[in-house]
Image (cartoon, rainbow, N blue to C red):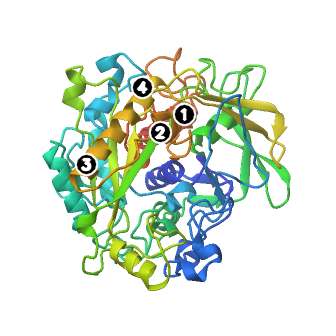
Amino acid sequence: MKDFDVLVVGSGAGGAMAAYTLTKAGHKVLMLEAGRDYDPTTETPMFNTGADAPLMGAGTVDKDFGFYDATVDGGWTVPGEPYTTGENSEFLWWRARMLGGRTNHWGRFSLRFSEHDFKGKTRDGLGADWPFEYADIAPWYDKTEDLVGVCGTNTGLDDMPDSAEGVLQPPPKARVPELLVSAAAKKLGIATAPMHRAVLTRPKDDRQACFYATPCGRGCSIGAAFQTTTSLIPMARATGKLEIITNAMVSSVDADENGKVNAVTYIDKETQQAVTLSARVVVLAASACESARILLNSKSEKFPMGLANSSGQVGKNIMDSTGASLGAQIPLLEGRPRYNEDGHTANHLFIPWWGHAQHARGELDFPRGYHFEIGSGFRAPGSGAPGNLQGYGKEIADQAKRQYGAYVGLALRGEMLPNAQSYMEIDEKVQDKWGIPVAKFHWAWSKHELKQVEHGLKTAKKILETMGAKFTDPLPSAETAIAKGGQIIHEVGSTRMGASATDSVTNQYGQTWDCDNLFVMDGGVFASNPHKNCTLTIMTLVMRNASWLASQLDKGAL
């Protein structure tokens, strides 16, 4: 492609949706991807067992989620691409260096943000509001859910906004352990609901329906479990208006003296050479922290603090989801009959946040909510084993058979508020193998998140005890139980949107205040980080914002 209208950096949820939306609107797009080309239809090891892999498929430093995880190249540790942390800070930064980015690996949980989530500051005075209402984004959620293929149901719960009629595909049936969790939670006044997931239960376009047999985390060669490499990218390519360059590590974006972006420079990983491309409009969708890194490294006389950073907010306001878990062996589930309980491999039911009314009444000592994901059921044995096996031979084999499928785990995922101690900057003393200065992270959980986790652990224990579990040890402290920053892989907020150029990086459409032809279309623009997985909202925002960008191009405004 010798000429293009928009240059998009990144091929994950944001970059692929931007390319799809723009090409469908008739605009030519050039996409730069830092990782290698990847084709899940030929590369996905869907049917291999742990016995076929080294260490029975267990996770290692090179393959954090196991030998067969769909993040073929990348993880929290990427060879030749270090990052640093500040004093007393722990932060894990996940990079997926492959076409499709994190969408090849993600959990596919697809929960809408609600009216509570977009205006949190108005409600409790903390964090920042989004510069629009839920009603403004609701129609775009419908379009995104329909395009992606999300299964679930309308629940009427105040934490789960309804989709338009006919948008959601049917969810899989709940498993026996999930029904037991649901009954126990109901006794405590807590509702459960079908998890909304980007997994097809009915065929769509040329993607097949899930056949409930293999782990989604390995990728999906039939396209049932959503990833951009089997959906948005092929769809955009089919227009004839998308060209992709892989192994293109973007180092900077250039702008002229008037603040207009005019070029992007990347390192060709295969030749080790720097390549500069002229560009009329640039969309950064490299992931929240990578896009911020590019902006901070794009210094000039006009932008001495980094491109689009006159507010000083690039790299600030980083948030991840809180994470903690509690599980137990449930005697009632021991020794039950064996049957196929795979489903679409993740939880079919979950526990959405139930405390909005309690928050409004001031009954909780933490400001934002969380949900529980349920881990249970008959699953293929892996490298681990139940923790309470004792003895040898037939004795231990009988215990393992009796306990198989009887463990239930509740994983908490909660909202984090931005704080001044959690941010990223450029470490000028360290470069990656491409000669690009690396990111340096500073991180701290606040009392809000610790109180939230404390509440969640107590609630999880009550639910499990109601199911018949027995606990002999005290609960861990929140400080011990909470996951490290970045460990949940939901980091957002580094280039947040807002209503004013003084305290935000972009407007509501992801257009940077400082450069009108530079857009950010990834999780960096999030003004808050509700407890729900961020990918559905990234794609929804990008569909909306790229549609707005297309209209501006059509009018000649850019």
CA gap between label 3 and label 1 equals: 55 Å
Q: Which residue is mark 2?
A: 549
Q: Compare marks 3 and 2 and give the one earlier in the sequence.
A: 3
Mark 4 or mark 3, earlier in chain: 4
C-alpha span from label 2 to label 4: 37 Å
Q: Position of residue 534 (x, y in %)?
A: 43, 44
Amino acid on which the number 3 mark rests in the picture: Ile
Q: Which quadrant of the figure contains the C terminus?
A: top right
Total numbered circles: 4
Helix, strand or loop at disc 3?
Answer: helix
Left or right? Give the position of 399 relative to 288: left
- Write down the residue under mark 3: 463
- Say which of 258 and 392 sits in front: 392
- Dot 1, how many residues are within 10 Å of its Cα: few (below 14), some (14-19), or many (20+)? some
Q: Which residue in the structure is indicated by mark 4?
A: 448
Q: Residue at x 22, y 38 (%)?
A: 354
Tell me the mark number nearer the camera, choosing from 2 and 4. 4
Tell me the amino acid under the disc marked 4: His
Q: Which residue is mark 1?
A: 558
Q: Assign the N terminus to one quadrant of the image.
A: bottom right
| Rendered residue at 37%/43% (across/down) | 532
**Left or right: residue 200 compared with residue 267:** left
Task: Estimate the spatial distance between the alpha carbons at disc 3 and disc 2, rounded to whole Å.
Answer: 48 Å
Task: State if disc 2 and disc 1 touch (CB < 8 Å).
Answer: yes
Q: Position of residue 158 (x, y in %)?
A: 19, 38
Amino acid type at image mark 1: Leu
Q: Secondary structure at mark 2?
A: helix
Q: Residue at x 72, y 27 (%)?
A: 256
The tag earlier along the polypeptide, 1 or 4, is: 4
Answer above or below: position of 84 versus 203.
above
Between 127 and 145, the one lying in front of the other is: 127
In the image, what residue type sits under mark 2? Leu
